[in-house]
Image (cartoon, rainbow, N blue to C red):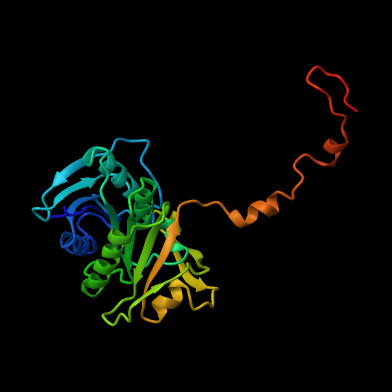
Amino acid sequence: MKAKPSILVVNDDGITATGIKALIEVMSEIGNVTVVAPDGPQSGMGHAITIGKPLRFDKVDLYPPIEMYKCSGTPVDCVKLAVNKVFKGKKPDLCVSGINHGLNNSINVIYSGTMSAAVEGAIEKIPSIGFSLDDFAQDADFSHCKKYIKQITEQVLTNGLPEGTLLNVNFPKGDAIKGIKICRQANAKWAEDFEEREDPYRRPYYWLTGVFENYDKGEDTDVWALDHGYASVVPVQFDLTAHHAIQFLNTWDFNGGEAKAKTSRSADGVNLG
């Protein structure tokens, strides 16, 4: 009998979040689950790691018999500790992150602790997936996502992923998901503002607000898919090189016009013309 795959489950909403409980339930149907998650909310941490203070790392019995650990650090810290201290270098077959309370579509992938944990898994050459739902409520209902999460996970375990690639999966709110769309990341961003308020001592403080603006009218984007009732699946890479710009940059003159006119000399100082 083929051994069950080993699956690392992480998140950024904290180990007690409703979303990670739902993800644990699905993954327990597929393989042997180990959970390493932050001890509290770490949303918006991106790919931050802890370097200026010690990390706390404790075993917990939240959902027996699942092996679970809470970590005082970031989602990326959780993956690093899992690989080094729990799996002791023998990496899991899969890393899944989420289910996040709130979308991580479009530009949100840059800021997301959920997706950064999955990215760290991919950096470690572990097939990785990040899952998110368009619902910020603490008691959000994740039940309608489960069958799609299982399908996507089983496809990854069967087919693998290209090296350096992971999946960003987002679900619309509600139980009427039409299906799955393979998408590209939409060209969209937050038009941000900082609401100024005063504390009891009349000192100003600021609260980040904003409106999500979509500049992309394509029907092959994650924003379009979610707006039309589909789950979006975007392949993501952590190589941030803008390959299309290399040829353009190679046309630049970094030596300057004067440098070209200068006389060349050999290593011993002889004038070469």
* Side of 11 relative to 33 (left or right): right
* Side of 20 relative to 166 (left or right): left
Image location (x, y in percent) of residue 122? 37, 51
Residue extending furthest right? 273
Q: Quadrant of the N terminus?
A: bottom left
Image location (x, y in percent) of residue 135? 31, 71
Residue at 17% x, 49% y is: 68
Q: Nearer the viewer, residue 258 or 91?
A: 91
Q: Quadrant of the C terminus?
A: top right
Residue at 35% x, 69% y is: 170
**Total numbered labels placed on residues in the image:** 0
Image location (x, y in percent) of residue 134? 33, 71
Q: Nearer the viewer, residue 99 or 28?
A: 28
* Side of 102 relative to 90 (left or right): right
**Is residue 43 something one can see in this rendering?**
no
Image location (x, y in percent) of residue 184? 47, 68
* Side of 184 relative to 12 (left or right): right
Query: Is residue 144 shown above or below 245?
Result: below
Residue extending furthest left? 64
